[in-house]
Structures are given as structure tokens and as C-alpha cells.
Image (spheres, coloured by chain):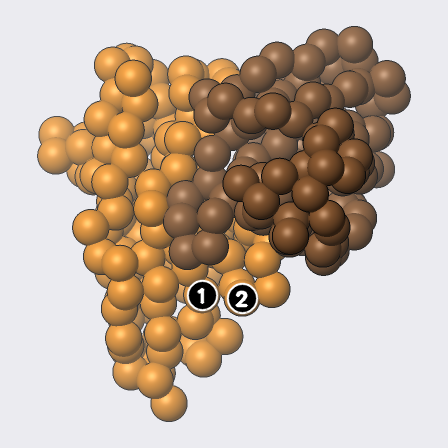
Chain colours: A orange, B brown
Amino acid sequence: AQKITQTQPGMFVQEKEAVTLDCTYDTSDQSYGLFWYKQPSSGEMIFLIYQGSYDEQNATEGRYSLNFQKARKSANLVISASQLGDSAMYFCALPSNFGNEKLTFGTGTRLTIIP
Amino acid sequence: EADIYQTPRYLVIGTGKKITLECSQTMGHDKMYWYQQDPGMELHLIHYSYGVNSTEKGDLSSESTVSRIRTEHFPLTLESARPSHTSQYLCASSKTGLISEAFFGQGTRLTVV
């Protein structure tokens, strides 16, 4: 069974600082991938970044990057130069099996950016 | 910007009523999903579909039902709403092929009184 663990229920970060949101996972699949989604207070889920276990380099998308460490089974999201608009819930998610977008979500981290 | 729409955004309804939550996408995606999310909690998959006439139950047991008669439309129905059904329901879709991101609608916040 897939399992995602996000151990930081809430974080407060000063604007313009970098922040790392932790995510560890457990899967028996040899090939897999990790998604990160952002959920603002309005409720929709916004895709941020994805990395497959087969990718050699850590994924980056603008201010978002993944610190993917397969040996430790962690896929931490790094947000550089945080902005007030980054305040939201952040979810890490793992597909139930490779090639399938049935996602298992972590419990999320509520990030608050302080002006 | 994702083209997936859910209506209504908010719904307050009495116990025992039948309700249908609508979800439509204009991206031509074959795969569609319904997730349930309690406030401040993770999302749980309750239904999914791989295409027209395909529906499967997700990991979380739900009394709701779904149908997929058209590619773009994936409505969720509760025959008799109960207070325990109070939650947020999020619809998503993704394209066929190797893993691609799921696009989510804005959700329906359902309150059953």
C-alpha cells in the first residue's frame, strides 16, 4: 500500500525567505512519481511540480524545486523567495501505481507567509 | 489554466434530499476522478473513470454513485443526503498516457443539515 507522510502541520515563514516542506513516502513500486499540489483558501488544487523516480535531476518549476532523495524516500518541496500569495495548504501525493493518476495524498502542510 | 468546472460551488441541503454534483471538463481527458476532503484534511479518492461507461470505486468507501455517459461529464449523485456527507468534493481529470498531472475543479462544499 502507498503511504505519504507530511510531518509539518503548519509553518510560518518570513516573506522572501526560502522554505522547505517535508514529504516522505512508502511504496513497493520500482517506478513511481511524486506530485506536489497547492490548495489556497478558495479550495481548488493547483499542480506545482512532479518528479519521477527515474529522473536523474531534481525537478524545478520557477520558484519551486524538489529535493528528491530516493534512498531516504523523501521528496521535499523547496519554495525560494516566498511571497504572500504562497500562503496555502500544500499536499504531497503519490500515484497508487505507476502510470496511474489515482493519487494518495498526505495530510498537508499549512504554510503562512508573514509580511 | 485548467478547464474543469464544478457546480454548485456551495450547497446547503436538508437530510434525505437527492443531490447531484456536476463536473465537466473541456480538455478531452479520458480519466476523471472524484475526491472527498474534510476541512484541513487530506483528499481521499471515492470514484474514478477511465472513459465513457467506465466507473470504479476509489479507496474510500462512499454512498455516492457516479456515471460517465459523455467524456466531458462526470456527475456524482447522493440519493439520500445525510449530515455525515458534509464535506468538500473535488473533481479532477487527467489525460491518458504515462503519468500526467491531474487538473482539479474548484470543488463543491456540501453541507447537509
**A95, B46: nearer the viewer:** B46
Q: Residue at x 28, y 29 (%)?
A: A3
**Is residue B27 something one can see in this rendering?**
no
How far apart are labels 2 and 1 at the CA level? 7 Å
Q: Position of residue A82 (x, y in %)?
A: 37, 74
Task: Using residue A16 as the reference point, say whether residue B61 is left or right of it.
Answer: right
Binning the other alpha carbons within 10 Å of mark 1 as few (below 14), some (14 to 19) or many (20 upward) gives some
Q: Amino acid at mark 2?
A: Ser
Q: Chain of mark 2?
A: A
Q: Are marks 2 and 1 in contact (CB under 8 Å)?
A: yes
Q: Residue A63: which numbered mark, if any?
A: none
In the picture as drawn, the residue positioned furthest to the right comes out as B70
In front: label 2 or label 1: 2
Q: Amino acid at mark 1?
A: Ala
In the picture as drawn, the residue positioned furthest to the top comes out as B53
Q: Position of residue A107 (x, y in %)?
A: 33, 46
Residue placed under numbered mark 2 in the picture: A41
Tag 1, which secondary structure?
strand
Q: Residue at x 40, y 49 (%)?
A: B41
Q: Residue at x 20, y 50 (%)?
A: A7
Q: Earlier in the sequence, mark 2 or mark 1?
A: 2
Q: Does residue B73 lie above or below A14 as drawn? A: above
Q: Residue A88: which numbered mark, if any?
A: 1
Tag 2, which secondary structure?
loop
Q: Residue at x 58, y 58 (%)?
A: A43
Q: Chain of mark 1?
A: A
Task: Using residue A38 as the reference point, say whether residue B87 is left or right of it.
Answer: right
Where residue A96 sits, quadrant-wise, is top left
Q: Position of residue B73 (x, y in %)?
A: 83, 29
